[in-house]
Amino acid sequence: MTTETLHDLRGDQPRFQGLEAGHRACQGCGQALAARLTLEAAGPDVVLANATGCLEVFTTAWPDSAWRVPWLHSLFANAASVAAGMEAALKMQGRDVKVIALAGDGGTFDIGFQALSGMLERGHNVLFVCYDNEGYMNTGVQRSSSTPHAAATTTSPAGVARIGKRHLKKDILSIVAAHHIPYAATASVAYPTDLRKKVRRAIQVDGPSFLQVHAPCPLGWGHGGELSIEVARLAVQTGLFPLIELERDVLIGAMPIRRVRGIKDYLRPQGRFRHLFADDPRAREELAHLQALADHNIEVYGLRGDRPDTLDSEGADTVHRGGRHFA
Amino acid sequence: MPIMTPGAFAYPGTSLDFRTGSWRTARPVYQVRPSPCHAACPAGENPRDYLARMAEANPRAAWETLVAFNPLPAITGRVCEHPCESACNRGQFDAAIAIHNVERWLGDEAVRAAWDYPLPAPAAEAPEVAVVGAGPAGLSCAYHLLRLGIRATVIDRLPEAGGTLRTALPCYRLPREVLDAEIGRLLAAGIPFVGRTRLGQHVSLAELSQDYAAVFLAPGRQQPRRWDVDGRTPKDLHPALTLLQDWVALDAVPAIHSALIVGGGNSAIDMARVLARTGAEVHLVTHDAMPGPGVSRDVAMKAAPRDIDQAIEEGVTIHVEHGIRRLILRGEKVVGVELVRLKKLLRGDGRYEVVPFEGTETVLHVDQVIPAVGQVVDADGMGSLLSENGFFAAGEDMRLPGRDAIYAGGDARERAWGTVSGAVGDGRKAALALHAHLSGRRYETGPAPRPMAIADLNLNYFERAPRAEETLLPPGLRQGCAEIAAGLSPEKVGAEAQRCFSCGDCLACDNCWTLCPDQAVLKSRAPLAEGARYHIDYDYCKGCGLCAHECPAGYIVMEAESRPAGRQQGP
Ligand SMILES: Cc1cc2nc3c(=O)[nH]c(=O)nc-3n(C[C@H](O)[C@H](O)[C@H](O)COP(=O)(O)OP(=O)(O)OC[C@H]3O[C@@H](n4cnc5c(N)ncnc54)[C@H](O)[C@@H]3O)c2cc1C
Ligand SMILES: Cc1ncc(C[n+]2csc(CCOP(=O)(O)OP(=O)(O)O)c2C)c(N)n1
Ligand code: SF4
Ligand code: SF4
Ligand code: SF4
Ligand SMILES: [Mg+2]
């Protein structure tokens, strides 16, 4: 096809394309995909407030924008406050437009946390989406409070004193849900049907809602760009990243895991966990620790599927000829 | 383009101005790759492609896709041992697609709905080829010639077309109505057939070569191979082929109390079953092993496992890896045999040798021994063309060495498949080679396709689903021409088609379109059959390879970019 006919075809896609090509994300970026899928389900009547971070940077290299909806860049810390202000202004104008705040895990778990808490507490009609790539990726892969235990980053290296991050990944979903908001959920780029369904559900909430989307970062996690979906899928299938939904702090749904995989399947393709495969007693202990964390998730959220299900970790994205997905 | 103002204020432009395609070091390419079922089919069919049309609920297109290779699907759907299913990637996942049932249903449906074979009428000045033998090889050759615009006349010494399918295949596996309907329709589609014409008697090779642009010889193997034990044969010896032919034609078999059939192929098994139905005690002895996982094709019985299983159900006792050491004769009549255990062992030179084991001899009392040890070509009128071992030494293109316009295939050639689908495939190859020859071109066969492996698929996207099994007539009810295998309902045929992984071709699952982080995959409304539904926009594709990794069907391959990765030139 010529560039012209492809251009016409691009203008005639049978889905809403809120985030266009030409953005500067790395090859295989999970966050770029997650944002595109979010907009696909949420658009076109939305406005966005985007915290500083990779997503903001790679979509808006001056003077281009990859966004096809109104978009505002907040500071690193205050996407939730800016979104709250936009929501209040739109309400004053009597306009029925959903406001979505977008932020990385740094802009959510860490520096953006008090703004987020305030927005939730004040009950703004805002969907806050956190793209969780488990580190400060835009500034060169520093640890965040979302970085998993034992993962290596530039500020939690696999060194002499410690091998990888000493602390645990913060349980942001429980903290958010404790604000007693109508809807909070986790999702993953590996399960796009589930992800879009959760976006649609969150959009319909009149009040604050929250999504934490697991989005692999090939650069920061140290895997090939072609493996982003594979790695995200394994995070779910090992129990390390449970896909759950909460209403008013009550668990209302969890994606069952049909075939629980051992955590090594998830860790092995990723450079940030390479040190855990060294012949080192500390590495063995950390592996056992991570397995215990996965087992704990499976137990706490009741993730083990008791029979094959079209909505479980193996059935949720089964394909059919002609693009018919289940759900 | 962004509009720039003094002071470098800019209205935002679209990121589409920025071609991230220049980052790429490898590009994803949609590429149809050979499926294992296709690579395994001796007739050259591509089951994946007709399963796809079937899954789209378009049975007529499915049939047309099928008969582009094999004009006899109602027949092969019943009698082919379906190597496609043994090769099917789905077999390593849960169970192979029941390809033969889909094939059979399409063949039957074409008869029922009277779909026309897609055959152009040949031009008046088109060259004409003489085809000798109206078995599957000859019929397939004539049909494919016609598809290629070449006329063909088929002659046979018998009054009716069909070859061994008509003379020896039992009606409980291949009902006469099915045979008559499919072959009748094929001939009616424009293939002139001249029966009761025997090469070497009514017409000579020289005459055919004179009157026709070329000749295709497909006389099959009509002559039972000689058989003896240390030079001795019982007086009342009847080879299985002859007895089967009599049974098919006259519905009569000699009354036998107990018999030993010698051989492990189709004739042996069918002979055993026909006799078992008369109430006889039937044994079968073969040097070969029982086919099964881990058993090489070189040492396994040649009959289809399905038919062997049914024979056992019907009461036939099979002595695999045994041989006859001695005939026990009373006068010139058999009263028994001495059997010995043996094995076909691979020797250093790569050949198999039959090694009997002393001390394992047993005696079996039977009043008939019936050899079914293969057939040879009836040399009538063709003797000068046969090689020393009595078969045609045809090449890959089915041409006889040193002959310009004489081709041969089917059972009659050396290293023949010995099956209907093999004969159909030979006929097609001969037609392609004849077409090339008659249009003054060289016929290129090219390397055999390397089928894609199951490792090239992404199995995360497939659900396990049970294979539809056809019902079989219980052994007690298997009498006369009652067909044993019932086939599948149209619903089940459709469900089987849906199970196909579509190895190496697009399933239209949308995965690449859904998962490209760069919006570089575009979807059109073009019909899938033309392979034009998805397009990669190389202006933006960064070459991450994610689409290729997540394509369930292995239809996307990454190819290294020839140009070095360069920096973006700037919008
Ligand atoms: C009992 C039995 C069961 C079988 N079961 C199966 C099965 O289940 N599945 C399977 O795939 N295969 C089976 N086969 C094998 C299969 O039938 C053959 O491989 C196939 O028919 C070969 O096709 P062909 O066209 O080469 O020859 P044939 O089908 O043998 O046809 C040859 C034709 O040439 C004619 N002819 C011969 N000489 C002359 C001449 N001089 N002049 C004019 N005409 C001549 C003959 O009359 C005949 O019609 C079976 C074979 C037998 C005997
Ligand atoms: C107040 C402030 N401190 C530091 C920075 C530098 N900075 C920009 S992005 C970023 C990290 C972003 O991490 P995260 O929110 O997880 O998004 P990611 O880039 O990983 O997608 C930092 C530290 C900043 N812009 N503002
Ligand atoms: S799954 Fe389909 S395409 Fe693949 S080998 Fe089996 S029938 Fe052929
Ligand atoms: S997923 Fe997109 S960017 Fe990556 S190789 Fe495929 S088409 Fe190119
Ligand atoms: S991912 Fe799906 S739609 Fe894309 S090429 Fe593969 S089978 Fe076709
Ligand atoms: Mg981050």
Image (tube, rainbow, N blue to C red):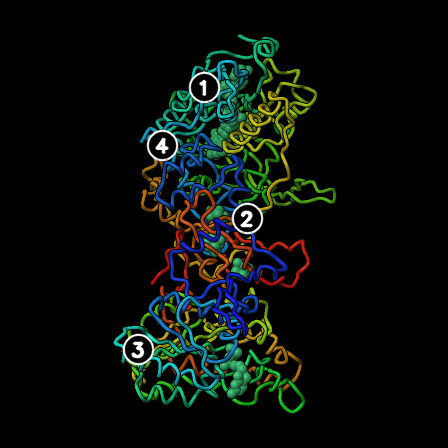
Between the C-alphas of marks 3 and 1, the distance is 78 Å
Label 3 marks which chain's residue? A
- Where residue B110 is drawn, which disc sits there? 4
Q: Please, which residue is most extreme toward the right here?
A: B348
Q: How dense is the environment of label 1, judged by Cα within 10 Å: few (below 14), some, or many (20 and up)?
A: some
Disc nearest the viewer among 2 and 3: 3
Give the vertical position of B393 relative to B63 (above or below): above
Mark 1 / mark 4, whichever is N-terminal = 4
Picture coordinates of residue B188, whole percent (x, y): 39, 20
- Where residue A90 is drawn, which disc sits there? 3
Q: Residue at x 33, y 68 (%)?
A: A45
Which residue is at the front of the view, A175 or B464? Answer: A175
Q: How dense is the environment of label 4, judged by Cα within 10 Å: few (below 14), some, or many (20 and up)?
A: many
Give the vertical position of B547 relative to B261 (above or below): below
Q: Is mark 4 within 8 Å of ligand 1?
A: no
Q: Is residue B240 visible?
A: no
Picture coordinates of residue B38, whole percent (x, y): 52, 42
Question: Image quadrant for the C terminus of chain A?
Answer: bottom left
Q: Is residue B24 visible?
A: yes
Label 2 marks which chain's residue? B
Query: Which residue is the site of mark 2?
Result: B31
Between the C-alphas of marks 1 and 4, the distance is 18 Å
